Amino acid sequence: RKDANLIVKQVRPRVEKEQGGKPVHKWKKAGILLSLLSVAEAGSSAYFYKRTMKRGMASTERTMKMAGTDWSQYEDLLKERKEKFLARPREDVSIRSRDGLRLRGTYIPNGDEKKIVICFHGYTSQGMSDYIGLSDYYLRHGFSMLLPDARAHGRSEGTYIGFGCLDRYDALCWIRWMIHKAGDDAEILLHGTSMGGATVLMVTGLELPAQVKGIISDCGFTSAKEVFTHVLHSMYHLPAFPMIQIASMVNRKKAGYGLDDCNSAREVRKATVPALLIHGSGDTFVPCSMCDRIYESYACENKKKLIVEGAAHAESYYKDPAAYEAALDALIGGIIK
């Protein structure tokens, strides 16, 4: 008991100090520090959100830098194909999205206009940019081409980028427009690159018109949440939590969807159309493992996968055009007359 009384006497002054002395200021300082950290985190999340999800803030140059693909080595080929591509007759076309946006695109007629490929571009790009190289293949094989500008890209209206989640409904609008123009006997392919690849994968989760015969997804990602998490970890060495969660909450309020509301690997479990999935093994922007997951989940048994060794993001066609075109031939030959 004597020892216990001694301990109480020693502790009591310390408690009294905590109630009225300097330690209280330490707790206040800790509270202020936590508040500042919270403000800093909120500021970082807001900055990340604006730079990633909003039109005008998301930069093509920054995207290309993050993707890391060396396009200079294909400069001559792209220049030659671009000249031929732009020399063809084309029409400016437009539709209304289900939420009232004016979406614009370019239609390039070819042949009897019954075989059509609708091409969906990548993040921060536009319809007439991503398919300059592939236009040679499709035009040689008698396809007309429809090249929409995604919402919040190019000439299309919109403030917030859809990342496939909103774009899948826009894709459905373009498909209906194309059927109305070409007729009920039209045969349609959907080809998407990067964000466009995610778009055509996600649209397979919707009820597609019978005129859609198949899809091609080149370096498509699973979801905005997963690709952003990968970029934050691998390129910026930053934790995804709570930045992604805050951005997702803000985006749901402003744009109408959360960053994982629509996931390609989940949506393709409902797929009923044949698919060709393409990815580069050297893609550091959208990891090749996402392609593997999507392929395993893809419900339609008529599915093919091409992994191009050493190809960086969206480089597969240029890295190995023979393998790419052979894969297209194998898919198209079995589904389109």
Image (cartoon, helix red, strand yellow):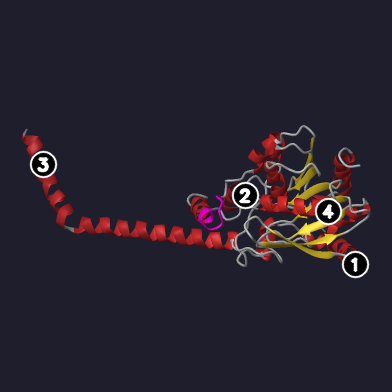
What is the C-alpha distance between the residues marked 2 and 1? 37 Å
Q: What's the distance in space between the residues labelled 3 and 4, CA to CA?
A: 79 Å
Q: Residues within 10 Å of mark 3 (few under 14, many from 20)?
A: few
Mark 2 vs mark 4: in front: 2
Q: Earlier in the sequence, mark 3 or mark 4?
A: 3
Q: Please check the rendered image and state whether residue 253 is part of the magenta-colored stretch, yes or no.
A: yes
Q: Residue at x 27, y 58 (%)?
A: 28
Instruction: Name the kind of residue labelled 4 in the image.
Output: Tyr
State the separation of the CA atoms marked 2 and 3: 57 Å
Residue 228 drawn at (x, y percent):
59, 51
Find numbered disc 2 in the image and state the secondary structure of the residue it sits on: helix
Q: Which residue is denoted by mark 4 in the rendering?
A: 318
Q: Of circles 1 and 3, which is in front?
A: 1
The residues tagged by marks 1 and 4 sit, at their Cα atoms, a distance apart of: 22 Å
User: What is the crowding at mark 2: few (fewer than 14 residues within 10 Å), some, or many (at least 20)?
Assistant: some
Q: Which mark is residue 87?
A: 1
x then y, percent, for residue 270:
68, 36
Q: Going from the N terminus, do you reach mark 1 or mark 4 first?
A: 1
